[in-house]
Amino acid sequence: MQALEYFLIPWLDLKLLFLVAAGTFAGIYIGAIPGLSVTMAVSILIGFTFTWDVYPALCLMVGIFMGGVYGGSRTAILLNIPGAPAAIATAMDGYPLAQKGLAGEAIGIATVMSFVGGLIGIAVLAIAAPTVSEFALTFQPRDYMLLALLGILLVGSLSGESLIKGIFAGAMGLLIGTVGMDPLTAEERFTFGFTQLWGGISFIAVMIGMFGVSEALAQLHHIDKQAVKQKIGRIVPNWSSVRKYLPLSLQTSSIGVIIGALPGTGGDIAALMAYDHAKRVTKNPEVPFGQGAKEGLVAPETANNAAVGGAFIPMLTLGIPGDAVTAIMIGALFIHGLNPGPMLMIDQPQMFWFITGALMLANIFMLIFGLTGIRIFTKIVEMPRSVLIPLILLLSIVGSYAVNNSITDVYWMLAFGVLGYFMKTYGYQLGPVILGVILSRLLDDNWRRAILSENGSLAGLFKGILTSPLSLVLFTMVVLIFVSQTPVWRRLRRKAGIPATSHDQDTTGSGA
Amino acid sequence: MHDKRKRSAGELGFNGLLFLGSLILLWNAYKISGFESLSSPGSLPMAVAFAMVVSSGLILLENFRTPDRDGTVFLRDILPPVIIVMMLFIAGYAVLLVPLGFLPTSFLFLFLSILYLQRGGLVFAVSVSLFALICVYVVFRVIFTVLMPAGIVPEGEILAAIGRFFGGAN
């Protein structure tokens, strides 16, 4: 009963209600405008909302997250440009539908199905998270250490062209996180004699640089690309077509929640897997896949929104982010003095139920805004990049300055922006960097705790890992990721006929 | 996961720099506490710096072994003039932000970059940057109450005056 009370806080407070609505509305547009991404928006927003109370700040960010994941589908359908990585699969059948003049119908189905997916994701979050966090209390420091490693490795291996570049990016993030005074011994690490570095590098500066500035710089390559206009008819789908796809949407939602809940995997991978699943289970589609099959639209759209609820499970119960966006959300929680992890559910259950309530509310607003206001939408999406990019850069600078009122942070942000731009250009993933920065402290603490509890013996640690079922599973997964990158595995995959998941390097908006 | 890709312009140099940087960081990590114990403050930094050296070394090696170039030109495809100019603009913005203050610097930045990216259209650039600046200012300064460097514009006094004006009108 108490839980319900906390759950309803954002529903009953007019200000919070408005903030969730505003966040969702903004999120839909941010997700839809090619060149703006949820990661970018949330990281810049942390800089502006850190003076707020935690409730309103969370409302705004939850709304943007939910709206943004959905918003990417709009441009995927209308322009064949996924506004966010999670919408890559949506474009495969969504754009052909638009070409046939069925853009309105496609958007309508995508919206309703995103709502269904979101609903299931949140339901699973509400049911599973308390159990997971109880289970997480039995975790040893070595398990946390392995989980953190697993998360970084998964993001590194799944989101880019090579694991080795992912490892480099993750290690770099971890190293950035260690800069400053060691929290345990006050020893200086990587300060190079500068007192300014004692407090470490602000992770917000790193985030905004990597996802704001570097993305904006990369967008300059496409400055002259023109948006294609589409005619949009009826949007609200009829009940019969919703009912027809409901069974499929339930299946793909479960895929979405599970993939979303795995550390390191987010909506983009969930969507691709769901698309693959739909292709396998739909025996006789009315229209072949890739040419405008509605199944191909339903599957990724339910899955990527279901993944949002899923992604919050490891984030809130273990403190391990599922992808770049949740990594940034964790950063936001840190800023507000919260410490996501199993203790959050015990010490501050209201925070968990509040977030769940806000997510649910955002999901409803997404449905409302998704089915209305399409005409203004097409206007906003056509905003020229020559205006958009300077604005992103301006907000990046203001956002990074505002956190500590420090110009040093702005310089760091710019430096990471330029570094991120080159890393992106040469095929390095930026998601692992952010995960590394966020998880650095957790990894450092738990590694030292784990090794101290074994009296500094590495053999003792390994013995511990091999004798505990949980540690063994995690350890095996870490090893498997390395094995999966060896030529033997790739040959096996090719034999089995599984295509390698490739990500369009040109997709606008950067997610994981 | 491409099986083989060609080398882009400047890629070898960039990977080389990353490798060099990783080596320097590893040396610095070693200096924190050396091989004192596995739980010393330098252990994680050393481990991750080592991972950086190994991974960047492998990337560099693989890169070195692929002589095929993909036909990209560094100053055209990787770092075209438009990106250099915008990098300079933001660097200039960051430098001028504190001495000049938020409003004039932001206006200057928006105006110049829109003018440059749009290739002309003076009226468009002025009006759009003014409008955008007002929106940004209202949203972030007034709603989000973010403190920005005031610089040469007596922003506080102006805000107070506006407040008094409306306060008095009521």
Image (cartoon, rainbow, N blue to C red):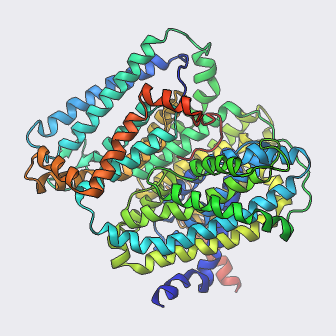
- Residue A336 seen from this side: yes
**Could you tell me residue B50's position as x and y percent?**
26, 32
Q: Residue furthest top?
A: B67
**Could you tell me residue A229's position as x and y percent?**
87, 45
At 58% across and 62% down in the image, what residue appears?
A: A254
Q: Relative to residue B5, is residue A83 depicted above or below?
A: below
Q: In terms of depth relative to the viewer, which is nearer, A332 or A235? A: A235
**Could you tell me residue B70's position as x and y percent?**
60, 14
Left or right: A136 as drawn, with respect to A321 = left
- Residue B151 seen from this side: no
At 36% across and 22% down in the image, what residue appears?
A: B58
The image quarter in which residue B90 lies: top right
**Could you tell me residue B107's position as x and y percent?**
64, 47
Quarter of the picture holding the C terminus of chain B: bottom right
Q: Relative to residue A5, is residue A315 depicted above or below?
A: above
Left or right: B29 as drawn, with respect to A68 = left
Left or right: B39 as drawn, with respect to B161 = left
Q: In terms of depth relative to the viewer, which is nearer, A463 or A347? A: A463
At 21% across and 36% down in the image, what residue appears?
A: B29
Query: In this figure, what is the number of numbered marks?
Result: 0
Q: Relative to residue A405, is residue A488 depicted above or below?
A: above
